[in-house]
Image (cartoon, rainbow, N blue to C red):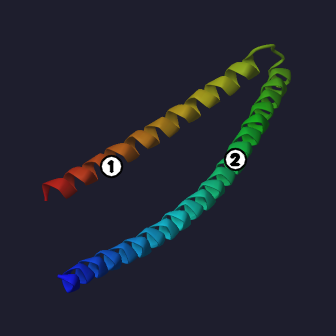
Amino acid sequence: MFFRIVKIVSKLLGMACILELVREKLAVLIYTFQHSLKKKAKKVGWILLIFSTAFILFGLGLRFLLLGLACWLNQIFESNYIGFLMVALFCFLMVAAVLLMLRSHINDQVADQEKITDG
């Protein structure tokens, strides 16, 4: 009877030791995962900040460039509004061209997806 109790207690203590080791390993694994995730989030945040700043500065530069072009065209045509209309028309045509290219690109991707799923 005593040996049975000793055997049961040793099994329980062995399990407790194994559970403690597993808990410690999991804690270390979770900590390293959190640390690497924070590191990657900071990196993505900085990249997003840099790209958004560059995009804003590029947009402002392009806006002033187009304003200058419109004023210059107004002086050439000796009018107060023809330069602005020409620049606006050019911008609308560029947006339409980009949308048409994106539309054809998206349609090509859909067709490729259908080929993949069909065959």
**Disc 1 versus disc 2: distance between alpha carbons?**
32 Å
Find residue 32 and report its image quarter: bottom right
Q: Which mark is residue 49?
A: 2
- Please state which of residues 51 and 4 is positioned toward the viewer in this rendering: 4
Residue pushed farthest bottom?
Answer: 3
- Could you say where residue 50 lies in the image, as x and y percent from the top left? 71, 50
Among all residues in the image, which is located at the extreme top?
Answer: 80
Kind of element beneath mark 2: helix
Q: Amino acid at mark 2?
A: Leu
| Relative side of 4 to 12, left or right | left
Q: Looking at the image, which residue is at 51% across and 32% down?
A: 96
Q: Residue furthest left?
A: 119
Q: Quadrant of the C terminus?
A: bottom left
Image-quadrant location for residue 101: top left
Residue at the (27%, 82%) spot, across then down: 6
Q: Is residue 36 above or below residue 72?
A: below
Closer to the observer: label 1 or label 2?
A: 2
Give the vertical position of 37 relative to 54 (above or below): below
Q: Earlier in the sequence, mark 1 or mark 2?
A: 2
Vertical relation: 32 (above or below) 47: below
Q: State the residue in front, 74 or 67.
A: 67
Badge 1: few (under 14), some or many (20 or more) residues near its Cα, within 10 Å?
few
Going 79% across and 35% down the picture, which residue do you hit? Answer: 65
Q: Secondary structure at mark 1?
A: helix
- The x and y percentages for residue 15 are 32, 75
The residue lying at 86 percent from left, 22 percent from top is 75
Residue 115 is situated, as x and y percent measured from the top left of the image, at: 20, 55
Left of 14 or right of it: where is 37? Answer: right
Q: Is residue 58 left or right of residue 96?
A: right
Name the disc covering residue 108, or none: 1
Q: Hey, what amino acid is under mark 1?
A: Asp
